[in-house]
Amino acid sequence: MASATLKGRKDGYEIHLDDAASFTDNLTDLTALFHQVHDAQQALQEEQANFVITTGNRLLTEDQETAIRVLLDAYPHFEIVAFRADVVTTADLSPLLRQTHVPVSIGVIRSGQEREFDGDILFIGAIHHGGVLKASGSVFCIGEVSGIVYAGYPDDAEAVVVGDLTEATQVRIADMVDIVDSNNAHLTPHAFAYVNDLHAIDYAECINLRQIRPRLYAQMEE
């Protein structure tokens, strides 16, 4: 069984690396997949191809990511736009975990399930397609988000949603709903959702959180 599997996305391809296989096997199967995509792109008279690499419960090292990128040297029109894992490093978590006033929940919200929290919540895990995470405050997600995230329930328009929302179905804040469009240029893996001055859900890079929501940022620094 192949340790690397390919599926199409609206904006390119996603390759999942089996975290139970050796990284050497991953590289071997990746090499074959890139060659297959190259042949298919030539048949379609297309050159550019974007890839998202998912690694499940394996967090790649910088050297491993570099080894994968080296495989693309033979395909100058191919690009890896993101590496995604279901786990994070302690360094990534520690700034958020130091905010002890934000409760932490770890788990999986599956299709048809809904979990509701009072106040702000840091959710670590996965929200599957058809699953709903709802909070009366802001929501901070680390992990896979494929379902619906609802912050500021029912009427707190100052709440935000932070996390990789590129694969989410919907984002809701207070009484507003956004059907997530992966072609939205403002929606990146490092963006957060907020309600703008036009009373609509918008997205901005997390580096702008302090400017857009200064009171929330100040609370996080306390």
Image: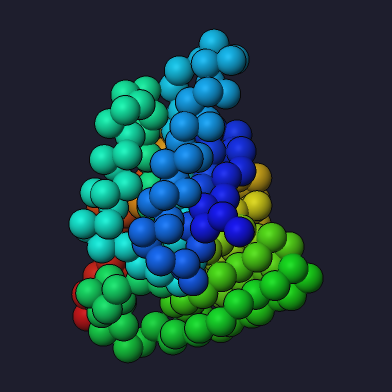
Position of residue 159 relative to residue 197, above or below, is: below
Judged left or right of residue 107, residue 101 is left
Nearer the observer, 100 or 74? 74
Could you tell me if residue 181 is visible in this image? no
The image position of residue 126, as x and y in percent, is 56, 70
Residue at 47% of width from left, 67% of height from top? 21
Q: Position of residue 87 (x, y in %)?
A: 41, 72
Q: Residue at x 52, y 30 (%)?
A: 37
Where the N terminus falls, by quadrant? bottom right
Percent x, y of residue 199 = 54, 45
Q: In which quarter of the image is residue 136?
A: bottom right
Q: Residue at x 74, y 75 (%)?
A: 113
At 50% from the left and 40% from the top, the residue drawn is: 33
Q: Report the label total.
A: 0
In the displayed structure, would residue 97 be above or below residue 83?
A: below
Q: As drawn, is 118 to the left or to the right of 214?
A: right
Q: In this view, does 57 lie above or below 36?
A: below
Side of 181 relative to 138 (left or right): right
Of the pair 96 and 200, the residue shown nearer to us = 96
Q: Can residue 130 be seen in this view?
A: yes
Q: In which quarter of the image is the C terminus?
A: bottom left
**Colour scheme in the image?**
rainbow
Q: Nearer the viewer, residue 132 or 42?
A: 42
With 196 as the anchor, is 69 left or right in this view?
Answer: left
Q: Give the residue furthest to the right.
A: 112
* Residue 130 image offset from top left, x and y in percent: 73, 62
Q: In which quarter of the image is residue 155?
A: bottom right
Of residues 173 and 62, the one nearer the viewer is 62
